[in-house]
Image (spheres, rainbow, N blue to C red):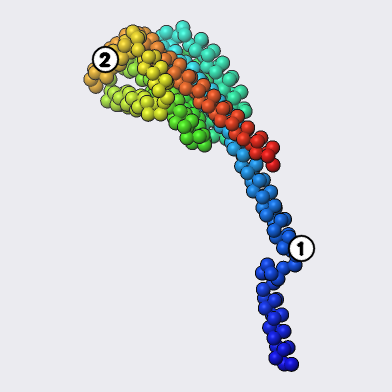
């Protein structure tokens, strides 16, 4: 009797200890485990899939807005570069083109502000806020150039324009790391590199104009001009490494012709002028030839920017279709 009691206790102990094993489960609990729990897991996985697709769609929409801001920033940088050249000529006593350049900048700024307003606060970089603040100072800078030409430091004027353009180029650079698909990111890098090349060409244009007002070419000025020229060359190499073949072909064709040959010839005169000697060249011809080169660079940049926006818009549409299909299947 004692043995039987002990065996029963042991069996009950084993049953209690192994309650979680399938053979010890009631039928209802077994059915729950077989049917309900897997179904719940499938619902959770489906929810995560839908969330992921929706998240990708939101990210794609964000990238499109940033790409449009980058595009507007490039157009505004182009207009500001032209105004900087006009301001340089105004300081040299030729203010005729400054008004038209300023109107072009104002139009580009209006577009830029409208596009920037569509970008979420979290995506507005320090460069965006800095560009906005620097733009607010443009009216006073124009007055200083037109009304006080003889009292306005050439270097200060060029620096003020350079700071705004640098902020705009920083906005464009931010799009490179914003999370675009790999192939599109390469195209973005190409467009940004060409913008940097155009800005280097603009800095060289105005820097040489300023150098002609000096008695002799100083070591600092010569070094600065050489640095800008090196930046231009490096930016074009970066462009070649990332641009689409049709873009490089377009640029090769754009950087040809009589005006571009004149720009190269005059640039050779600048680079061969020894330190300590006066930089002597026809300033008006220099400004005109360099403006033609910048215009060609900006035209190709605009083509690249438009293609990048189109790529991202197409990617966004694909994400939206996938998200809709995923949600519909659920």
Q: Is residue 42 left or right of residue 72?
A: right
Mark 1 Cα-neighbour bin, 10 Å: few <14, some 14–19, many ≥20: few
Q: Which residue is rendered at x = 75% and y = 67% of the image?
A: 26
* Residue to which mark 1 is pinned: 28
Image quarter of the C terminus: top right
Mark 2 Cα-neighbour bin, 10 Å: few <14, some 14–19, many ≥20: few
Q: Which residue is rendered at x = 46% and y = 7% of the image?
A: 96
Q: Is residue 149 visible?
A: no
Say which quarter of the image contains residue 103.
top right
Query: Residue 291 at x, y = what percent?
Result: 40, 13
Q: Which residue is rendered at x = 67% and y = 73% of the image?
A: 18
**Label 2 to label 1: alpha-carbon separation:** 93 Å
Q: Is residue 41 left or right of residue 262?
A: right
Q: Is residue 159 above or below residue 85?
A: below
Q: Secondary structure at mark 1?
A: helix
Image quarter of the N terminus: bottom right
Q: Is residue 232 visible?
A: yes
Q: Secondary structure at mark 2?
A: helix
Q: Is residue 178 above or below residue 21?
A: above
Give the mark nearest the N terminus, 2 or 1: 1
Q: Nearer the viewer, residue 288 or 232?
A: 232
- Give the mark toward the camera: 2 or 1: 1
Query: Residue 6 at x, y = what percent?
Result: 70, 88
Query: Residue 184 at x, y = what percent?
Result: 48, 30
Q: Nearer the viewer, residue 226 or 316?
A: 316
* Residue to which mark 2 is pinned: 269
Query: Residue 9 at x, y = what percent?
Result: 71, 84
Q: How many numbered marks have been drawn onto this rendered protein structure?
A: 2
Q: Which residue is rendered at x = 58% and y = 20% of the image?
A: 111
Question: Does the CB distance between marks 2 and 1 fall below 8 Å?
Answer: no
């Amino acid at each position: 009797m004692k043995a039987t009691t002990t065996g029963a206790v042991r069996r009950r102990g084993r049953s209690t200890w192994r309650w979680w094993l399938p053979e010890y489960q009631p039928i209802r609990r077994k059915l729950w485990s077989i049917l309900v729990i897997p179904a719940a897991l499938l619902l959770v996985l489906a929810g995560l899939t839908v969330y992921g697709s929706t998240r990708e769609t939101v990210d794609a929409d964000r990238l499109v807005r940033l790409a449009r801001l980058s595009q507007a920033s490039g157009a505004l940088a182009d207009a500001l570069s032209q105004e900087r050249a006009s301001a340089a000529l105004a300081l040299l006593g030729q203010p005729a083109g400054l008004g038209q350049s300023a109107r072009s900048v104002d139009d580009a700024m209006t577009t830029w502000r409208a596009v920037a307003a569509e970008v979420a606060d979290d995506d507005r970089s320090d460069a965006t806020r800095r560009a906005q603040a620097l733009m607010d100072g443009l009216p006073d800078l124009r007055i200083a150039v037109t009304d006080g030409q003889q009292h306005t430091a050439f270097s200060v004027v060029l620096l003020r324009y350079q700071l705004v353009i640098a902020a705009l180029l920083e906005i464009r650079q931010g799009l490179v790391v914003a999370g675009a698909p790999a192939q599109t990111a390469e195209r973005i890098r190409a467009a940004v590199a060409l913008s940097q090349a155009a800005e280097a060409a603009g800095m060289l244009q105005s820097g040489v104009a300023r150098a002609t007002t000096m008695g002799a070419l100083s070591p600092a000025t010569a070094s600065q001009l050489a640095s800008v020229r090196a930046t231009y060359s490096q930016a074009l190499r970066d462009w070649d490494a990332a641009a689409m073949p049709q873009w490089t072909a377009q640029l090769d064709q754009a950087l040809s012709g009589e005006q571009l040959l004149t720009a190269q010839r005059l640039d050779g005169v600048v680079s061969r002028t020894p330190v300590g000697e006066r930089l002597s060249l026809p300033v008006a011809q220099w400004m005109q030839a360099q403006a033609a080169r910048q215009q060609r660079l900006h035209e190709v940049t605009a083509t690249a920017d438009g293609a990048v926006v189109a790529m991202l818009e197409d990617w966004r549409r694909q994400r939206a279709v996938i998200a809709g299909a995923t949600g519909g299947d659920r």
